[in-house]
Image (cartoon, rainbow, N blue to C red):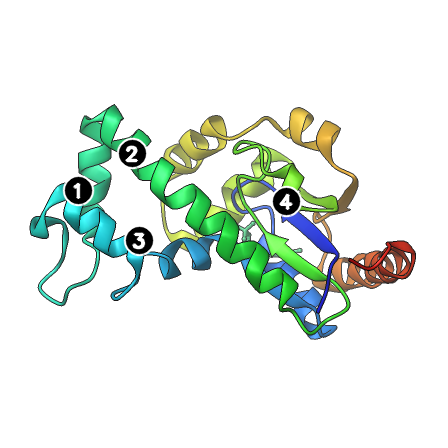
Amino acid sequence: MSNVVIGLTGGIGSGKTTVANLFAELGITIVDADIIAREVVAPGTIGLKQIQQQFGNGILTADGELNRPQLRELIFEQPTAREWLNGLLHPLIRTEMLKQCKAAPSPYALMVVPLLFENKLESLVDATLVVDVPPATQLSRTTSRDGVSEQQVQNIINSQISREQRLARADRVIENQGDIAQLRQQVALLHHGYLELVATKPKL
Ligand code: ADP
């Protein structure tokens, strides 16, 4: 049972997944908001049932899964549908993330939340860790990872909190301009710091 949660965030292509994998190598449990966002609408969940009741069976694929492109289109066209959906999903996602963090067997849990600051989720975590690279690196790494255009990545960068604001809110920053060996060294140092935090935080 861990009662310390570190919130890992950063812009698109900054290296969140890469950093999370390095913490996982040290035995730390990773709780990923994007994965949980899919879990809470998997077939058989209350989440999917409610979406089906709200938008009709047409929102499901032939296999009974959520038809994501269709849902995206629907909430793009109807702001009230988007609000309804967020009202349903955000509490489900929060609850599940906290549950998985509490159940983590590691001394602390690492919660990966790309939009931690944008969605005002700082209260879920004990400390924030920001992965930082300049926008040019975000662009080059994301275009080669996803095979998308620079403009598409730039649009996503523009929709996220600015680099300056993100850094201003960070408790700790991990700099990812160097190679993986340099990243691993920073992760090791942070890990030791977090173990100290665990030792000093009163048990619930
Ligand atoms: P995020 O999860 O924040 O979107 P990723 O961890 O997927 O970012 O990293 C984006 C891309 O950049 C991936 O293809 C990853 O392998 C690569 N990458 C991450 N860190 C480095 C690094 N230090 N050097 C070179 N490539 C990196």
N-terminal-most mark, 3 or 4: 3
Asked if the residue under mark 4 is in contact with the one under mark 2, i.e. CB atoms within 8 Å, the reply is: no
N-terminal-most mark, 3 or 1: 3
Asked if the residue under mark 2 is in contact with the one under mark 1, i.e. CB atoms within 8 Å, the reply is: yes
Q: Secondary structure at mark 1?
A: helix
Q: Residues within 10 Å of mark 2 (few under 14, many from 20)?
A: few
Q: Indicate the amino acid at tag 1.
A: Gln
Q: Which residue is mark 3?
A: 47
Foreground residue among 134 and 12: 12
Q: Residues within 10 Å of mark 4 (few under 14, many from 20)?
A: some
Q: Indicate the amino acid at tag 2.
A: Trp
Question: Does the image show residue 143?
Answer: no
N-terminal-most mark, 1 or 2: 1
Name the mark on residue 84. Answer: 2
Residue 149's spot in the image, x, y percent?
A: 36, 40
Residue at (91% x, 59% y) in the render: 196
Q: Where is 198 relative to 121, above or below?
A: below
Q: CA gap, disc 2 to disc 3?
A: 12 Å
Foreground residue among 170 and 56: 56
Q: Quadrant of the N terminus?
A: bottom right
Residue at (59% x, 26% y) in the render: 162
Decide if residue 68 is on the left or right side of residue 133: left
Q: Residues within 10 Å of mark 1 (few under 14, many from 20)?
A: few
Q: CA gap, disc 1 to disc 4?
A: 29 Å
Name the mark on residue 124. Answer: 4
Which quadrant of the picture is home to ligand 1?
Answer: bottom right
Q: CA gap, disc 2 to disc 4?
A: 22 Å
Q: Residues within 10 Å of mark 3 (few under 14, many from 20)?
A: some
